[in-house]
Amino acid sequence: MTYARARLWTGIAGVGVLVVFSLFMYLWQLPATLFPFDGGPLWAEWAALVTLFKLYVLISLPFDFLGGYWLPCKYQRLCLMFPTFWMKWVRGVLMQGAVMTGSALLLFESGRRWGVWVAACVLLVLQVLLVALQLPLARWVGGLSLRPLRGVGGAPERSVVVAGFDGGLSGGVAGLPGRETVVLPAHWVDSLPVEGARALLLRRLGVIATGARLRGLLLASAWNIAGFLLCAHLPGAGVERLWEFVTTLVAFTLWSFFGLLVLPSLSRPAVIGADRYAMEHGAEVPALHHAIVEIDQLQEDEPRRGRWLERIFHPIPSVENRLRAMQSGAASGGAWHAARMALYLSWANFGMLSRAVHCNSGRPELWVLFPGD
């Protein structure tokens, strides 16, 4: 079994266990048993949400260990000393827990006092804050250090390089629309020729210029808000009592799972569009081809996949499909990384699948800046 396929099965197992846990919690209405009190001091409500987060961490721990420590060591990827892995994981979990429980408490208090639609507005504001703070959170959660990008022509002043430890780190685009920061990982820039690095930078600029990144943000945010509203109106759920609110949160995990099946098909065309933008704006085609192949080898080394495997689990087309699309003029457009951005933004309403998927399980460097193209 390849490293990529081993990670895929780890992610499938982790997501599956959390989905079964959430389904069990909802069908048996366990939140009403675990959190039966109504009202009380604010600290008691936050303590209840912390208890839920601890349960989530306990369930996720075996899969984080497999994805972040055991598999990289077994397949001779970046194998950290266990104490180093453990300390990085603890820091990431504590930061994520603070964001998730604090956001959930704000949602609950606003919903209990003013109703579900006000809570949905608060959720929108929280997601906007997560977008604005994506780069600082990546530093706090994953311990990433940043330095200015130099030596690559055409780099805007806002571009930075993320110097991370994880070979799967691919950076991305962070920040609010109009104030974006283009992030390139140091190991890409250092290992590729200048023309290859320039082609990658042009791709990142392309997802901003074509609106693909904005469409991805809007779709991801709308997906989460729609799921929150839908789940809040399910039987036994709501936002007025603590156990109803927890039921809403666990039901939202099922909605997030549905998003993992639907949203990747809207993300893949944007990857093709970024490739095409780079070609049309000065990137040397051989350098772009080489960079795509090289980066795939640095990350998971899976240049080709079966059609259904890619359609269900992967928001990024395989190398083989990307190169074919660049030659054939396949349709582009789409919403850039809507699937993975929806997982990150789900921190605002306790999205328990946000670090369980195969691409970032057990790797805090990738919990905020998900792996990308």
Image (cartoon, rainbow, N blue to C red):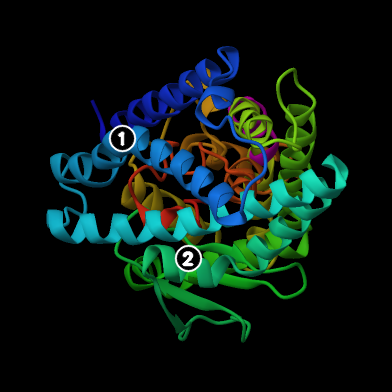
What residue appears at the point 14 percent right and 58 percent down from the top-left corner?
A: 83
Q: Please tell me the numbered disc located at residue 299.
A: none
What residue appears at the point 20 percent right and 49 percent down from the top-left corner?
A: 77
Name the quadrant of the N terminus.
Answer: top left
Q: Please tell me the numbered disc located at residue 63.
A: 1
Closer to the camera in the image, 7 or 98? 98
Q: Is residue 342 magenta?
A: no
Which residue of the protein is positioned furthest toward the top in this rendering?
A: 27
Assess disc 2: are there few (<14), some (14-19) or many (≥20) residues with their C-alpha within 10 Å of its C-alpha: many
Tag 2, which secondary structure? helix
Height in image: 31 above or below 116?
Answer: above
At which x and y percent is residue 211? 79, 57
Q: Amino acid at mark 1?
A: Phe
**Majority secondary structure in the magenta region:** helix
CA–CA distance between discs 2 and 1? 21 Å
Q: Amino acid at mark 2?
A: Ala
At which x and y percent is residue 284? 55, 64
Q: Do we see residue 334 in this rendering?
A: no
At which x and y percent is residue 305? 44, 27
The residue segment tinted magenta is: 256-267
Closer to the camera in the image, 61 or 270? 61
Q: Please tell me the numbered disc located at residue 138.
A: 2
Tag 1, which secondary structure? helix
Height in image: 310 above or below 319?
Answer: above
Q: Do we see residue 24 in this rendering?
A: yes
- The answer to which quarter of the image holds residue 185 is bottom left
